[in-house]
Amino acid sequence: MNLFDIENKVILITGGGGVLGGEMSNYLLSNGATVIVLDRREETVNAALEKLKKVSANVFGYVCNVLDETSLKEIADQIITTHGKIDVLINAAGGNMPGATIGVDQTIFDVNIDDFKKVVDLNLFGSILPALVFGKKMVENKKGVIINISSMTAQSAITRVVGYSASKAAIDNFTKWLSVELATKFGEGLRVNAIAPGFFIGNQNRDLLIDKETGKYTDRGDTIIRNTPMNRFGETDELNGTIHYLCADASKFVTGVVVPIDGGFSAFSGV
Ligand code: NAD
């Protein structure tokens, strides 16, 4: 038995049109999986499909807001009708928004609480709702893997991004909570884990890390590099090995973990 075989697994990726979700889709397709991309806008889904179809024909897409339970349920039924099962759900839709970030000259008392709530909604409920809707289909099949995306902001304070941090800390707890619930009540075939990427340049953080005018790292970008023992930002394809492992039977006794992929950032005290 090949522990790392993911051929013919049906893998659903929310935010599959984004930077990290797009890279994962590409990798998993190249390794024989069937990939279903979910993203919020039609043009994002179409652009992702156009790119990914060059890798394999086994890619499909749906326009879907991860906060819309009705639409998630309709899509779940359509996927079961078309593909018969859902093996893996990767919750890669997420991100930050400016109002939930404390500006350089601001303090916590200036935070926009509506944006704070929106960020928590997107990252937390945008993972909980798909986990419940697609997870129910996995339970019916007694087998399935859910992978959430946490962040370095979850376990220690990273300045400015307060709303995002709160939402990702909740993701860590929800990952553990759901892993226990599914394994104890529905059996060991149901697993829930998360990855915690370190710093990768994505749409959500580009402006914080790279100066638009000069193209150089901002002070914040420099500080991150100084606190990353490997002395660089991550490359998006460096998430693929861990994602592959978590999707496959190689990790069949692994549930409830959050794996940092961070060049040593979370291990380092800064001294
Ligand atoms: P991204 O902005 O490139 O991709 C996110 C995708 O999610 C986009 O395609 C967007 O359209 C989609 N999306 C947003 N709201 C949605 C909604 N309501 N319904 C459906 N789709 C929606 O971001 P990314 O850098 O690829 O990040 C992906 C995940 O990884 C996020 O959860 C992010 O917080 C997390 N993360 C990123 C980094 C990083 O350095 N880039 C680090 C740690 C964690």
Image (cartoon, rainbow, N blue to C red):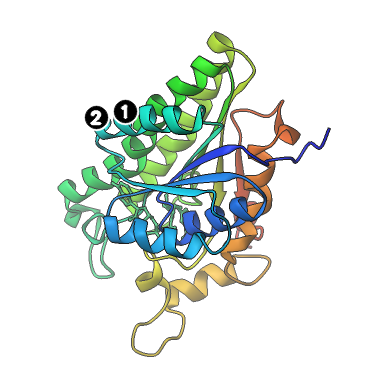
Q: Residues within 10 Å of mark 1 (few under 14, many from 20)?
A: some
Q: Is residue 97 above or below residue 184?
A: below
Residue 223 image offset from top left, x and y in percent: 51, 71
Label 2 beta carbon within 8 A of ligand 1: no
Q: CA distance from mark 2 to mark 1?
A: 5 Å
The answer to whether residue 109 is visible is yes
* Picture quadrant of ligand 1: bottom left
Nearest to the observer: residue 101 or residue 88: 88
Name the residue located 44 percent from the left edge and 27 percent from the top edge.
Answer: 80
What amino acid is labelled 2 in the image?
Thr
Q: Is residue 105 above or below residue 266?
A: below
Label disc, if present, on residue 155 of the rendered structure: none
Q: Secondary structure at mark 2?
A: helix
Residue extending furthest top? 185
For disc 2, the marked residue is 70
In contact (CB < 8 Å): disc 2 and disc 1: yes
Q: Quadrant of residue 220?
A: bottom left
Name the residue located 38 percent from the left edge and 66 percent from the top edge.
Answer: 203
Residue 241 image offset from top left, x and y in percent: 68, 51
What amino acid is labelled 1 in the image?
Lys
For disc 1, the marked residue is 73
Nearest to the observer: residue 236 or residue 212: 236
Name the residue located 64 percent from the left edge and 72 percent from the top edge.
Answer: 231
